[in-house]
Amino acid sequence: MAFASFRDWIRTLERAGELVRIAVPVATELEITVLADRAMKAAGGGKALLIEQPTVNGVVSPFPVAINTLGSWNRMALCLGTSSVDHAAAKLGALMNAQPPRGFKETIRLLGTALELRHAKPRLVNTGACQEVVHVFDTPQTRDAPGAPAPATSSLPTLLNLPILKCWPLDGGRFITLPCVVTRDPDTGGRNVGMYRMQVYDERSTGMHWQLQKVAARHSRRHAETGTRMPVAVFLGGDPVLTFAATAPLPDGLDEFVLAGYLRRQAVDLVRCRTNDLEVPADADVVIEGYVDPHEPWREEGPFGDHTGFYTPPEPYPVFHVTAITHRRDAVYPATIVGIPPMEDYYIGGATVRLFLPVLQATFPEIADVALPAEGVFHNLVFVSIRKSYPMQAYKIMHGLWGMGQMMFAKYLVVVDHDVDVHKTRDVLFHLGANTDPQRDTLFTRGPADVLDHATPHPGTGTKLGIDATRKLPGEVLTRPWPPMIRMDDAVKAAVEQRFPQILTP
């Protein structure tokens, strides 16, 4: 299901009973965080919030703020246009496992898949709602989209009058927290859309927190090597699947707009920026155009209250210079906050795991399921269940996953048998305690680490621990047989449940 605008998404949430409107003024400095944090930590992720009168330094902004719009399993499913995230994952899995047809029915089924894929490729259009209002900084003039009336000068956007949040008390300033950052490989022309927080320095410059392992950071290094100015475009809002796609761990070189087109079953319309040659979604709410100068010294960014639950300290990052800001007339500013889990990002990350599980299973068919518990804040803790058939198979999975994209950041990786529900932390901990000998069943190794992890010996590098909590097979240093788990006979259990329903029914 494709959403025509972010307001269309808001209306869908409201009809589904997933949105709470807040009509009174609320400060973008800390106050919105209090409301959002309370909502995100409510049962099931709480409700999405629409702050209709956000204030910036006491002045009401013309742009409402929407927050926690993806912060539940139901809202993630609505975003993907399916009844559940697992349903979307199954469709992607069927695509991954498609085989040559062996008969008429299979041919028809494969043609149906091809019809869905025809929407994946984005298409360039001449105009878009994201450019209904345009403020170009390099030439002190404003202009509107063709054929539309000129905007009033009082409404011209800068970074200082957008309702950008200061999330936590010790943050170094205001941060754009849901920016979809578009860059291009200067050699291949391949596009990347990533999500990197942006600290506002003044009305036309921000930090650009792309970490050294990110694709945009590689693009930046290449521009530095060639001495060329790096064009960058940032968009906010539009169809929420665009935001989800920007967070997806796609391999370098795969276009996130293609993934978005496939998921929404409609091609993403792109419009060319006004001050550089990058392309952004035509239905986005706000677009910030600009560049990074590879000759310019990096500037200190932070502190920032991060998804780790701690403040990340100030560090130097590239400076992003704004050349234009464009937006829809009815733009909504989308935001999120991160901090001590659970937060909205838990559901976004969880949906990513579900959606890309078939990709992992294509490489490792023995994997039954994967979970990233909220307490692990993504990079700290990963649970994996496998269908084990030979000795030391758990270690094969550990090494393999640590070599798979952003799985390289996993600090603790616990492998259990396929009949353990990895989404129930208590079940995993039970088998971890029951099935492991600390010396025999642990593996220490070293590798890349999340630069936001304050506990590593050095930024970006650290130690990893793998734990084999599977049942042990002959050949895994056993001197005695492995005992069976205690389980009641199914026939006896059914008979007793039938005789004593009043006792056994909760």
Image (spheres, rainbow, N blue to C red):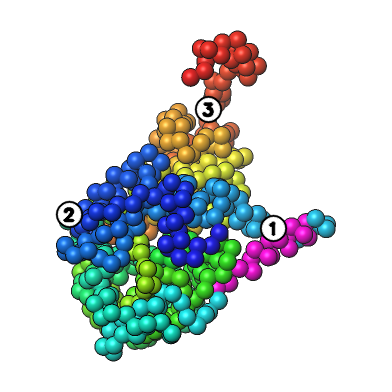
**Residue farthest to the front, as pictured:** 149
- Mark 2 near mark 3, Cβ–Cβ under 8 Å? no
In the image, residue 252 lies in the stretch drawn in magenta: no
Quickly name the residue at label 2: 169
How many labels were placed on the picture? Answer: 3
Quickly name the residue at label 1: 98
Q: Which disc number belongs to residue 238? A: none
Q: Position of residue 411 (x, y in %)?
A: 38, 49
Start and end of the magenta stretch? Answer: 106-122
Pointer 1 or 3: first along the chain: 1
Quadrant holding the N terminus:
bottom right
User: Which residue: 36% across, 68% down?
Assistant: 331
Disc 1 versus disc 2: nearer the observer: 2
- What distance separates the C-alpha of mark 1 from that of mark 3? 45 Å
Q: Position of residue 157 (x, y in %)?
A: 28, 75
Q: Which disc number belongs to residue 479? A: 3
Disc 1 versus disc 3: nearer the observer: 1
**Amino acid type at image mark 1:** Ala
